[in-house]
């Protein structure tokens, strides 16, 4: 097993691939059930263990869903239990890792821009995952152009400071949405729902940011990752 773990770590390093993991989707730090909170903490620790074996640093996770609680109670519970998770992360020796709570696409989930920034304000080990497809879906098409992205990015700088803001984690895809928010992920070829990547790339360049960007397109992750890479580097070349 040690040989296998060492192999993946060395191969990722050889090709300069930065590894991140997404913790299990059923994590819920708002759950009133103590046993399930302990399981959620365990899922984070298990994800960090595997991530470290692969030489990675960033662990993305979905914070919570309110269930039958009202949103305010659920968010307070999320903050309390996230602090408990943080204590376990430090106790298990993972203080050198990065935890990346993600903005969510459905209205009934914990994960607005402001909620994620509040979670990240708990400790510098947190760097937010801003899924701009989720944000656009939750707010029913809010991301129309460069200024819309700037408003969000500016808030990150204001709340978390320049160092963390410049190296945020980003998920990007176009997403179909309805009255409750996210319905399904699409590809970059979609012309109906958005959001568009080009204005975001402009903001990232203007602010001299160096985020990790992951494509979450439906079945065309490799192709759409290359598309975003080309858009970004073409803009960067023009700016220089």
Image: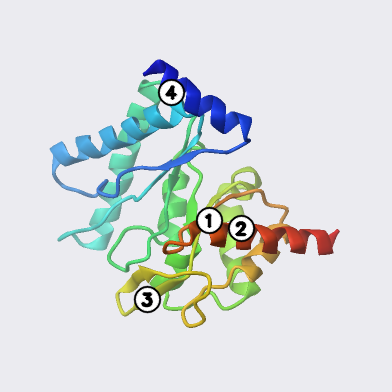
Whichever of callouts 4 and 2 sits on the residue coming sooner in the sequence is 4
What is the C-alpha distance between the residues marked 3 and 4? 40 Å
Residue positioned 32% across, 69% down in the render: 107
Q: Is residue 38 left or right of residue 207?
A: left
Q: Are marks 3 and 4 in contact (CB under 8 Å)?
A: no
Asked if residue 95 can be seen in this view, the reply is no
Is disc 3 placed on a helix, strand or loop? strand
Q: Position of residue 211 (x, y in %)?
A: 61, 49
How many numbered marks, from 0 up? 4
Residue bearing the label numbered 4: 5
Image quadrant containing the C terminus: bottom right
Residue bearing the label numbered 2: 226
Residue bearing the label numbered 1: 222
Q: Position of residue 101 (x, y in %)?
A: 41, 48
Which one is in front, 119 or 137?
Answer: 137
Q: Are marks 4 and 2 in contact (CB under 8 Å)?
A: no
Q: Above or below — where is 68 with respect to 180? A: above
Image quadrant containing the N terminus: top left
Q: Quadrant of residue 74?
A: bottom left
What is the C-alpha distance between the residues marked 1 and 3? 23 Å
Q: Above or below — where is 232 with respect to 7? A: below
Is disc 4 placed on a helix, strand or loop? helix
Foreground tag (1 vs 3)? 1
Whichever of callouts 1 and 3 sits on the residue coming sooner in the sequence is 3
Residue bearing the label numbered 3: 177
What is the C-alpha distance between the residues marked 4 and 2? 28 Å
Is disc 1 placed on a helix, strand or loop? helix
């Amino acid at each position: 097993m040690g040989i296998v773990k060492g192999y993946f770590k060395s191969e990722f390093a050889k090709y300069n691939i930065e590894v991140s993991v997404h913790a299990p989707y059923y994590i819920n730090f708002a759950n009133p059930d103590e046993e399930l909170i302990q399981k959620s903490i365990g899922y984070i620790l298990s994800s960090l263990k595997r991530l470290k074996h692969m030489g990675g640093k960033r662990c993305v996770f979905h914070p919570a869903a309110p269930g039958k609680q009202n949103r305010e109670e659920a968010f307070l519970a999320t903050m309390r239990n996230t602090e408990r998770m943080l204590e376990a992360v430090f106790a298990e020796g993972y203080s050198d890792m990065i935890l990346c709570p993600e903005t969510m696409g459905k209205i009934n989930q914990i994960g607005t821009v402001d909620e994620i920034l509040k979670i990240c304000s708990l400790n510098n080990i947190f760097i937010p995952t801003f899924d701009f497809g989720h944000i656009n879906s939750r707010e029913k098409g809010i991301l129309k152009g460069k200024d819309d992205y700037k408003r969000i990015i500016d808030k990150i700088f204001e709340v978390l400071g320049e160092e963390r803001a410049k190296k945020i984690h980003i998920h990007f895809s176009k997403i179909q949405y309805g009255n409750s928010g996210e319905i399904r992920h699409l590809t970059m070829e979609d012309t109906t729902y958005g959001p568009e990547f080009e204005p975001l790339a402009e903001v990232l360049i203007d602010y001299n940011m160096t985020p990790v960007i992951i494509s979450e397109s439906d079945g065309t992750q490799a192709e759409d990752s290359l598309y975003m890479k080309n858009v970004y580097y073409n803009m960067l070349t023009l700016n220089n």
